[in-house]
Amino acid sequence: MRGEILWPWGVRAARLLGIEQRSWMSLVDEAPERRDDRGMAAGAKAMTLTDAGLETVLLFEEGVELQCFAAFPLLDSDGGRAILRRYYEPFLRLARDRGADFVLSSPTWRANRDWGEELGYDAAALEAVNRRAVSFLEEMRDDVLAPGGRDRVVIEGCVGPRSDAYRPTLRMEVDQAERYHSAQLQVLADAGCAQAAAITLSYAEEAVGIVSAATAVGLPIVIGFTVETDGRLPSGDSIEQAIDAVDRATDGAAQSYMLNCAHPTHFADALPEGMARNRIHALRANASMKSHEELDAAVELDAGDPADLAERYVALRRELPGLHVLGGCCGTDIRHVTAISDAWSAET
């Protein structure tokens, strides 16, 4: 059963009133199959779409200079918001036309304290821009979709790592990570996000802190790990080790997990063997087969092959029973997500 998934008065208030908060997990239709202890039924996974590589589209296709690879400052001007709409709107229309649910994720991956300070944002300005991001997404959703289609869109607050995603120079302990990320997650919860996603995380301790911080403010959280070409996190942990570590430390509080910012050839042979495999519900892969180091040094975009990438998503569907949230990361754009959507639907 579908219900309202957006609470304009904020997640915390909804919880205090005893109202059920809807995230994308609530968009998965109930099925009679036995459900595992984290609420996911095999065979009950309607395709859900999301967007692609926001920052690489802005940088290489729109010609926007992104200081610190941050998109959120675009929210501060009419021109910047127009650029963001040009990026997001085709994805909303794609989901509408394909009859798919959609996760509309905010451009706030860099909108945390350290990156904000480097960009000239103090605490008050960061709070304001995170709130502005949510209202921007809500307004755009309402402009693009008719009222009957809006309840198929989940507004998601995106958070990123404190340090560099590929080469973290600062590794936090769990308590430190929880304190650090709690400010942004609190704002996103109060602004009315249905869920949050922490993407391009490279070590388990930061993920545990984020899950704890999100849980404290009543915000469902998706954890996205990135991996190197050997299928391991930059920390050296396997995907299975990282997921198991987070679930053990948080009693399975994360809504689900995502693999992102790596090409399927990097992790297809490194997927978990145990229950952690069932916890991966989302995929936002890179277009390029290049390593993170090669991508960092690139002066031209490697957009890969959308059709080949789509085929690899379909192949992973057979390996990951919970996989159904589909989008892209670096180098991908609307062409890739369209190809993924069509290939996925053809296999249904």
Image (cartoon, grey):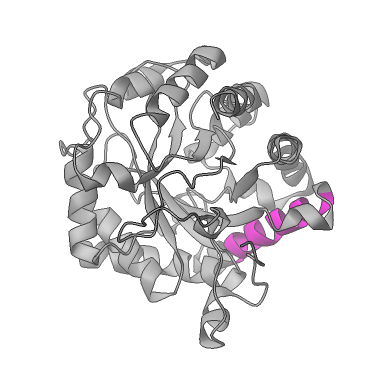
Q: Residue at x 18, y 37 (%)?
A: 238
Is 332 located above or below residue 195 in the figure? above
Task: Determine if residue 65 is in view.
Answer: yes
Is 292 located above or below residue 191 in the figure? above
- Specify the principal SS of the magenta part: helix
Identify which residue, 37 or 92, lies in the foreground. 37
Q: Residue at x 41, y 22 (%)?
A: 315
Identify which residue, 207 or 123, lies in the foreground. 207
Where's residue 40, x and y in %?
40, 54
Where's residue 18, x and y in %?
53, 85
Where's residue 115, x and y in %?
43, 50
Tally the marks: 0
Q: Residue at x 30, y 61 (%)?
A: 37
Relative placement, left or right, of 138 versus 284 is: right
Relative placement, left or right, of 325 versus 203 is: right
Identify which residue, 73 or 132, lies in the foreground. 132
Quadrant including the N terminus: bottom right
Task: Determine if residue 49 is in view.
Answer: no
Is 51 located above or below residue 316 in the figure? below
Q: Quadrant of residue 191?
A: bottom right
Magenta span of residues: 128-143
Relative placement, left or right, of 277 versus 73 is: left
Identify which residue, 54 or 270, lies in the foreground. 270
Is 47 within the magenta? no
Q: Residue at x 60, y 21 (%)?
A: 339
Q: Quadrant of residue 27?
A: bottom right
Where's residue 321, x and y in %?
37, 39
Relative placement, left or right, of 25 versus 76 is: left
